Image: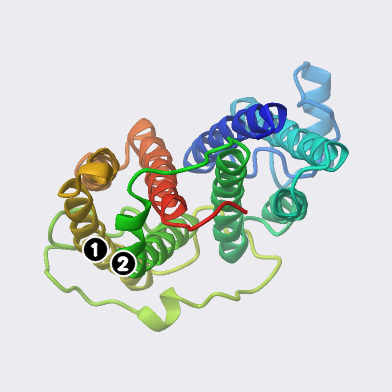
Amino acid sequence: MNPGLHRLALTAAVVAFAVIILGAFVRLSDAGLGCPDWPGCYGHLTWPVESHEILQANQSYPERAVESGKAWREMVHRYLAGSLVLLVLAINILAWKSAARKGVRLLAATLLVLILFQAALGMWTVTLKLLPIVVMGHLLGGLATFCLLLWFAWNTAGHTSVPGRQELRRLRPLILAAFALLVAQLALGGWTSANYSALACPDFPTCQGELWPAANFREGFVLLREVGVDYEGGVLDLRSRVAIQMTHRLGAVVVLIVLGSLSIMLIRRPHTRSDGMVLGALLLAQITLGIQNIVLQLPLLNAVAHNGMGALLLAAMLWVMYRSVAHPA
């Protein structure tokens, strides 16, 4: 057990969750290009505030006039993400100085590589003007960082035994399948958001008044698109966006069935009952928020909560998977 590393990793995990929430807020409030340059904002360390600064910024970037409300949101997100980079760097320094276990040092090094790549994705999100594959990758990178920090924190907590591990081992194939399906669904959610397809179907449970409307799946799932195009607001036609939204809905049904079945199995076992109840509650909350996004026409706070609940659901699945592992890293 390493209390210092454990506390530092938990702190970093909380900050990573906050970065995910703030990132969702920035993206969903159309502030992803609130600063058209990187790492500064219109050439400033913060953002233009004074009238002469705004005038100069508008002259330097005539294609994107300053919107202060969007600029400050983007920069606060960048600075919070920067603090997370420093925390991961501190984790690495402490892990190597304290002669932590080899597995812990490897996790720390992996975290550092991941967070630096995540920073690069943040830069490319801006410089490539919200290219959908980069936006989706940035979201998945944030979730991966959050999960790896949680795994690191659990590995440095000094657990010698985990109740219910034998029961969970028998469910491991289902646990792994459920985890993979959830990651795929979160990726679909990221693709839906990156292509502005959340309201392609403004009704529920139908879409455009039909159970299966006309959809262009070929065009909707082209991952590599032209570089240099401004993708803010999306460039796909309605049929392509419908294809994305319908796929996300079908994925939600599959996830509900698989994760719901797993939570019921966990609830029926004495040592895993609390895990199953938490997993089931988060799953129902996530499905409810997703439906409300459509019925209420994507209110900002509800949409941000949908992103945050997805991260918490992933963390709950990760905890179940961690408990099924025979030994710590």
Mark positioned earlier in the residue sequence (1 or 2): 2
Residue named by callout 1: 258
Q: Give the left or right position of residue 209, taking residue 67 as reference.
A: left
**On residue 286, which mark appears?**
none
Q: Quadrant of residue 91?
A: top right
Q: Position of residue 182 (x, y in %)?
A: 37, 60
Provide residue 254's location: percent of width, then percent of height: 24, 66
Q: Can residue 67 be seen here? A: no
As drawn, the residue found furthest toward the top would be 50
Q: Secondary structure at mark 2?
A: helix
The answer for how far apart the CA atoms under marks 1 and 2 are is: 8 Å
Residue at position x 70%, y 31% in the image: 75
Packing grade of label 1 (10 A; few <14, some 14-19, many >=20) is: some
Q: Can you say whether 75 is above or below 261 in the image?
A: above
As drawn, the label of residue 174 is 2
Q: Amino acid at mark 1?
A: Val
| Image-quadrant location for residue 178 | bottom left
| Picture quadrant of residue 242 | bottom left
Q: Is residue 210 left or right of residue 246?
A: left
Q: Residue at x 59, y 31 (%)?
A: 10
Horizontal side, residue 29 vs residue 70: left or right: left
What residue is rendered at 42% in x and 55% in y? Answer: 321
Which residue is depicted at the point 41% across and 41% down?
Answer: 312
Position of residue 269 relative to residue 39, above or below, is below
Say what amino acid the circle numbered 2 marks. Leu
